[in-house]
């Protein structure tokens, strides 16, 4: 008897778009079964945000989401994420223009040639820089600016697109979890909890160092493995399409126009950093900077007005899928809010911690915050929803409010690098053409290590009565 030629297919995670649509459907179905309820909202004096009054939860009339509204949540989600989506399209357009000038290929070729024999240095150096951005200014969406370049550099150096994406996004994520002075997460959470701004920074510095060093080692070891044997990369076939259009042994002349284009890009990055640090720039301002960079680079590179327009559209179109992913990632939140079950979910999560020992409660808060971050991936948004409940709950559980903020910090930051509802994360892997399944397979061991680190430091926080209160 001949053996069957068919082999059982291994289980595979669905594509990002399919996975998000499944989450949307689950959220819609939940509005029919989960009791609708709400907290009364009050204005927080410290932050000016509308937050929940933890003592006012009450049931309200059920408001299930119809099939029509379930589908409508997708365009509504796209509207809510519009600033990020257009930010990405402008990035794509700017990169398209600069690539057309030839400056990108020639510049990258020069970098690759100069780094010959010491390519691995790029991993710890760039990861450390971006981890500082995550720790001090909450860098997240900003990393998307550099992903196309970093992926191209890493592939040209013999690494892969996973390495390029991880250097930037996971590097910043490690710093984000350390959150030394991240106003978007620690600042908001401590303000709502009544804690002094950026207090407890000593322990967070130790956490930042631990997470950053561990993450750099993990990515570095992977990069070296792929450098030695590129076939071990799950992205080996896809990365063949990413190549420099120059001969490294016979690099074209680095012309004045090339220098002007790259100088324009560098000045744009400098303007971005100054704007973020000094003037509070965010998505709209960053989009404006790179729209300006795109036009100036095109002129400096000798492109005609028609070529600038055509290349901008072509470049933007390469990130259209990533933009759609971001819109889909917001839809579940739209449904849970419209169905009036978001507050019910929060109350159920908080109630599940009641009566537990302090140490287990602290770890439980981390788990709760991680799960909730899937529903509300925004750092400041998640803090505004959960911390008004978690802060007073921690008082009853015998856990300091600073520890509750730490649990929130871990839960929010970690899920930003793996949750399918995190818009910037899904955009990052979409820009790199990495499937969600391949990313999870690569990142999961590091994610578990991060979770272990979180548990250890939460136990330490409880044992030292991490404060001031």
Image (tube, rainbow, N blue to C red):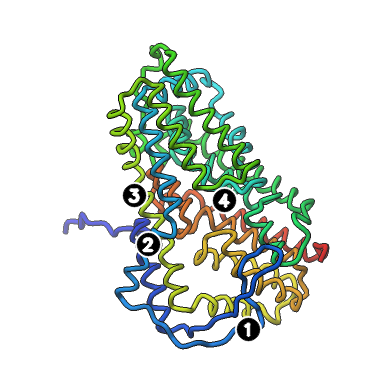
Q: Between label 2 and label 3, give the one nearer the viewer.
A: 3
- Mark 1 or mark 4: name the one nearer the start of the chain: 1
**Residue 5 got which mark?**
none
**Residue 375: where, in percent of width, then height?**
50, 67
Q: Is residue 445 visible?
A: yes
**Residue 19 got which mark?**
2
Crowding at mark 2 (Cα within 10 Å: few <14, some 14-19, many 20+):
some
- Mark 2 or mark 1: name the one nearer the start of the chain: 2
- Report which residue position mark 1 lands on: 56
Tell which of 325 and 19 is nearer to you: 325
Mark 2: secondary structure: helix
**Residue 425: where, in percent of width, then height?**
48, 51
Residue 278: quadrant of the picture: top right
**Residue 302: where, in percent of width, then height?**
35, 20
- Report which residue position mark 4 lands on: 446
Mark 3: secondary structure: helix
Q: What residue is at 44 percent from the left and 86 percent from the top? A: 62
Against 226, residue 107 (above or below) is: above
- Mark 4 or mark 3: name the one nearer the start of the chain: 3
Mark 1: secondary structure: loop
Q: Between label 2 and label 4, give the one nearer the viewer.
A: 2
Q: Between label 1 and label 4, give the one nearer the viewer.
A: 1
Dots 3 and 1: beta carbons under 8 Å?
no
Dots 1 and 4: beta carbons under 8 Å?
no
Q: CA distance from mark 4 to mark 3?
A: 27 Å
Tell which of 271 and 133 is nearer to you: 271
């Amino acid at each position: 008897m001949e053996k069957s030629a068919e082999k059982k297919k291994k289980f595979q995670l669905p594509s990002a778009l399919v996975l998000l649509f499944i989450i949307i459907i689950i959220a819609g179905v939940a509005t029919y079964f989960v009791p609708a309820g709400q907290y009364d909202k009050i204005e927080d004096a410290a932050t000016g945000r509308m937050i929940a009054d933890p003592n006012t939860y009450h049931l309200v009339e059920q408001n299930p989401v119809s099939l029509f509204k379930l589908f409508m949540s997708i365009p509504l989600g796209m509207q809510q994420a519009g600033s990020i989506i257009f930010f990405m399209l402008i990035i794509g357009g700017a990169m398209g223009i600069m690539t057309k000038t030839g400056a990108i290929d020639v510049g990258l070729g020069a970098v690759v040639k100069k780094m010959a024999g010491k390519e691995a240095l790029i991993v710890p150096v760039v990861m450390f820089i971006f981890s500082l951005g995550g720790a001090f200014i909450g860098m997240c969406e900003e990393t998307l600016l550099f992903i196309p370049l970093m992926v191209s550099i890493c592939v040209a150096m013999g690494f892969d697109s996973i390495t390029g994406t991880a250097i930037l996004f996971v590097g910043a994520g490690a710093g984000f979890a350390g959150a030394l002075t991240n106003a978007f997460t620690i600042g908001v959470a401590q303000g709502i909890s009544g804690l002094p701004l950026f207090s407890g920074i000593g322990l967070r510095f130790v956490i930042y160092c631990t997470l950053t060093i561990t993450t750099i080692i993990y990515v570095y070891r992977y990069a070296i493995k792929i450098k030695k044997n590129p076939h071990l990369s799950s992205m080996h076939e896809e990365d063949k399409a990413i190549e420099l259009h120059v001969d490294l042994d016979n690099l074209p002349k680095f012309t004045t126009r090339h220098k002007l284009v790259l100088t324009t890009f560098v000045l744009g990055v400098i303007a971005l950093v100054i704007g973020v640090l000094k003037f509070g720039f965010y998505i709209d301002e960053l989009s404006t900077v790179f729209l300006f960079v795109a036009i100036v680079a095109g002129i400096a590179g000798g492109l005609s007005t028609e070529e600038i327009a055509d290349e901008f559209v072509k470049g933007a179109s390469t990130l259209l899928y990533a933009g759609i992913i971001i819109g889909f990632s917001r839809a579940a939140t739209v449904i849970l809010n419209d169905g009036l079950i978001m507050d019910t979910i929060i109350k159920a999560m908080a109630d599940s911690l009641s009566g537990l020992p302090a140490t287990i409660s602290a770890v439980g808060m981390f788990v709760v915050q991680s799960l909730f971050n899937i529903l509300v991936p925004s750092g400041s948004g998640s803090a505004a929803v959960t911390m008004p409940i978690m802060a007073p709950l921690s008082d009853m559980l015998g856990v300091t409010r600073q520890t509750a903020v730490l649990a929130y910090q871990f839960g929010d930051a970690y899920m930003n690098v793996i949750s399918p509802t995190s818009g910037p994360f899904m955009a990052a892997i979409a820009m790199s053409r990495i499937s969600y399944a391949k990313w999870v397979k690569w990142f999961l061991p590091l994610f578990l290590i991060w979770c272990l680190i979180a548990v250890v430091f939460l136990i330490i926080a409880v044992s030292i009565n991490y404060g001031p209160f």
